[in-house]
Each structure stands twice: as structure tokens, then as C-alpha cells.
Image: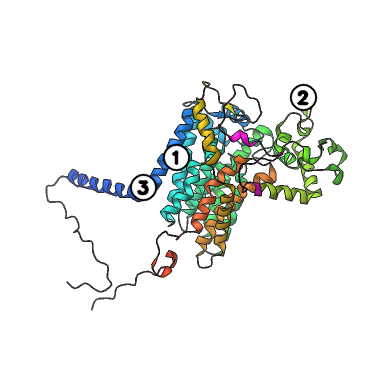
Amino acid sequence: MTQVPGARRRPEFPEDPAPAAGASASGASDAARPGLAAGTLRLARRHAVFLVALVLAAVARGYVTAAYSTALWFPDSGTYVDRAAWVEPAVDRPWGYSAFLALLNPVTTFREVAIVQHVLGLTVMVLLYVLLQRRGVARWLSVLAVLPLGFDAYLLNIEHFILAETLFVFLMALALVLLLVRERPGPLLVAGAGVVLGLLTLTRTVGLFLIGVVFVYLVVRLLVRTLRWPAVLAFLGGVAAVLVPYAAWFGSVHGSVAITDYTGHFLYGRVATFVQCEEVDMPERLQPLCPTLPPEERRPGDQFVWFADSPANAVVDGEPVWSEEDLAEFATIAIKGQPWDYLRQLLSETVHYVEPGRVSGPQDTCPTWWAFPYPDRVEQYECTPVLAPGPYGYDEEMVGNLRSYQRYFYTPGPLLGVCMVVGLGALFLRRRDWRDRLDPALLALVGLTLMAGPAATASFDFRYVLPTLAVLPPAAALALRGVSLRRRRGGQDPAEEPRPEAAPAAR
């Protein structure tokens, strides 16, 4: 038979013949098993570098777990644990992470909670690698994009705390994968992303900003006709399905329909570091809230929020002097009266996240909270964590090794800044289709929001930058999709390679 020019050749091996009459059905399944095993082996070989990195990342987390007898404990940890036992939303933070602890509590110790969080960290690494591979990113670039998730020392450290950050990162990664894994996600998939983002918001309220970013992304895709309106409505429905019942529950407990009722405190802590009441039109009744020291000598903003001697926490006869509305009014007047000081604070703290090193300013949250500690037995509130309830103990040599590792193996701020610029730069690559331009920009904007959101409403803390490791390197990888270590013939971009012409019909 003559081969038609340009037609694809058939495989060199013949198709499997039909089983002979009387052959057992189990024989066919047995024959399929070697094929499945061979396929799995080929897949493992194809992604061998990633699998090695994943195993080493698991070993690193095992080392952290072996170094401490239980999890690490931050002052916020007690609130999360208490609310998990009471099954009641706290005023100052949502109940999502407490719900996570409540689910694990019957069968786990705090050490085992930390192990679960380390597994979630590895799962995020896998999710984002799979996403990048499905989107056609080169394997070497996909591996580079997830290496910070595997080996950043500060991320390994935060996963061992009884804190919401690890669950937050997992839910964020899951939502973004649901949103980006298909070219045109249908309403069901987008609704799932909305539900996950709703759960994310009940873990950390900065999720509200992320919901806004994703909504704008979906609307833009709707305008450029790469998405249909039912998907946008499904997203809003998914978010509402989580947040509306929670807000109603919160209202039944605390009397106001909301997710938290501590916004006034956080905004007060934001402006208390720079406000000068003599320069703004501050009502006399709010004057007692004015800090007395010059701005350069004031404490960090988080201490204005939480410490008992903060003006915001003044008490008379056991009752708070200031309501959340009073504190929010004070903050609003301060921002309107000193807009440039507020903007300077916002920009300087956002830029601080992408500066070299882990240098702390006098008004920053103490960075040594996030260094692998030689923990004290009693909580000192002096920037040193303690161990969670359980057997007290740690291996001094192993902790010393972790501290040495942490000194060098973390993701540099400038690298995160470069990844953000590259991701946003994809918007201006006119040769790409809309999806290849919008998706990297979405991830980059999520990263920027994770930095700017706390800077605008709370205070600077290096732990707030850690979730960006799940979005900024992948944003750069998506923007550079098509880059290969191999030289391509004709210098063509893979996205522009012509498809093979159809074979001419045989006459």
C-alpha cells in the first residue's frame, strides 16, 4: 500500500488482537497491568526532577518535625484553639482555622496538626506544578517556580505553627487551580473556586481583597469574550454560599452581621504610627486616642491593636471606653487629614516586602517571631515563640542546624518583585492570546494584594509575604510559558508554531 505524502504513519507495532474465544477476562486485565505500570514509570521519569524535589521537601519537613516535640505557638494560637473548643466565632478573627482545628481535635495532638500542615504545604507544591504543566510551561521552569514552596525556611517554619497561614495558602492555591486549569472553566468549576475563596476568607480576612481581584479578572474575561456570564454569576453564588450563612451566624452571636467586628482596632493600629492630631481636625471626644510620643518614637502598629496599655483598649469599670465605630472614625479622620503620610506608609511597607534581607524597622512586627526558636517554657511576648501544649522538648543541635539553614535558604524579596513585574508584564505581550496575558497578571495581582492589603489595613509582618510564594513564581512561569532550554528551529515561539498541514486526499 502506498503511503500518502505528509500523512502520519501508524505505530510500528500492531494493535492488540481480540482475545481468542474461551480466553479468560482476567487475562485481559492482567495484560493491562504491565501497560499501566509502564505508563506510570514513563510519567515518573518524565517528571523525575520534580519528584526528587518533592521527596527532599518532605525530608526537610520531617527534619523540622523531629527537631521539636510539638508544634510552635504564637500569641494568636490560643485564640484559635479556644474558639475551636467553644464553637463560636471570635470578634477579632474569623472562625475558619478554628473549624480546621475542631475537625482535627478528636484524633490529633498539636504535633500531628503541624504534620497535617506540612502535608498541605507539599500538596500546594504538587497542585501548582500540575497546573503549570497543564498550561504548557517547560518542566524545568515549572520546577523552579515551585522550589520556594518546597524549601523556603520561613515557610517550613510557619507550617509548624498553630496558625492559619498554611491552611490559607492551601485554599488559595486550590481556588486558583480550579480557576485556571481549563481554558474556559464552566459555571460549576468557577462556583467551586468561589466556595473555596469564601472558605479562604473565613481563614484570613485578606481573602475579601482576593475575592475582589478574582471578580475583576472574571469580568475582564467576560468583556473579552473568553468567559460567559453564567460563570461570573456562579462565582458570586459560590462566595455567597459560604459568607452569607457565616455572617448571619456571627450576627446571632455578636449582634452585627459581619465576618469580624474588629476593623476599628486594626485601622487604629494602622494610623497610630503616624497620626499627629494637632495637624488634623480631630473631634475633642476622640482626642484621648491620640498617641503622645513623636511618630519616630512610637511602638509598632500591632501593639496599638493588642496591648492592654494601648489607648484603643482603655477600660473603665470593666467596659471598653471605645467602640469599633469610634476607632474607625478616628482612623478615617487621620487618613483624610494626612493622606500623603498614609500613602507613604502603605507604599514603603509594600516595597519593604521586596527589599533584600529580613531587616526589621522600629515599627515592624518583630521578625524573630519567625526564626526557628530555642523555645522558652513560659510565653514571654518578647518575639520568641514557645511550644504548643504537650511534651516539652527540642533537639538543640537540630534547631541550630535549622537556624543556620534559615539564614541563607529563603526567597529573596527582590526575586519576588521581579516575578511580580514579569507576571504583570504579560499583559503587554500582544502576540499572546487573552488567556496567556490575563492569567499571569491575575497571579501577580493576587501577590501584590497579599502585600498591600495588610499594609493598608494592619501593619508590616514578614509572615504576610509567605503566601505570595504560591502565586508570584508561578505568575512569572506562566508569563514565560514557551521558554525552553533547547534551541528551536527558526526561533519560533511554541505558541506560534504552525500546525502540521492536513494530508492531501488520496486520488
Given this view, does label 1 or label 2 mark the residue nearer the observer?
1
Q: Position of residue 218 (x, y in %)?
A: 56, 56
What residue sits 48% from the left and 36% below the top?
118
Q: CA distance from mark 2 to mark 3?
A: 62 Å
Judge whether residue 153 can be spotted in this image. Answer: yes
In this view, the residue in front, 223 or 486, is 486
Q: Which residue is mark 2?
A: 318
Q: Is residue 238 left or right of residue 496?
A: right
SS assignment at label 3 = helix
Q: Residues within 10 Å of mark 3 (few under 14, many from 20)?
A: some
Q: Which residue is mark 1?
A: 57
Count up the numbered dots.
3
Label located before the other in sequence (1 or 2):
1
Q: Residues within 10 Å of mark 1 (few under 14, many from 20)?
A: many
| On screen, residue 388 above or below 277 | above
| The quadrant where residue 438 appears | bottom right
Task: Give the residue type that dot 2 points to.
Answer: Gly
Task: Give the residue type that dot 3 points to.
Answer: Ala
In this view, the residue in front, 294 or 205, is 294
What residue sits 26% from the left and 48% below the top?
38
What residue sits 11% from the left and 47% below the top?
22
Q: Residues within 10 Å of mark 2 (few under 14, many from 20)?
A: few
SS assignment at label 1 = helix
Label located before the other in sequence (1 or 3):
3
Q: Which residue is mark 3?
A: 48
Q: CA distance from mark 1 to mark 2?
A: 50 Å
Rendered image coloring scheme? rainbow
Q: Which residues are magenta?
A: 351-375
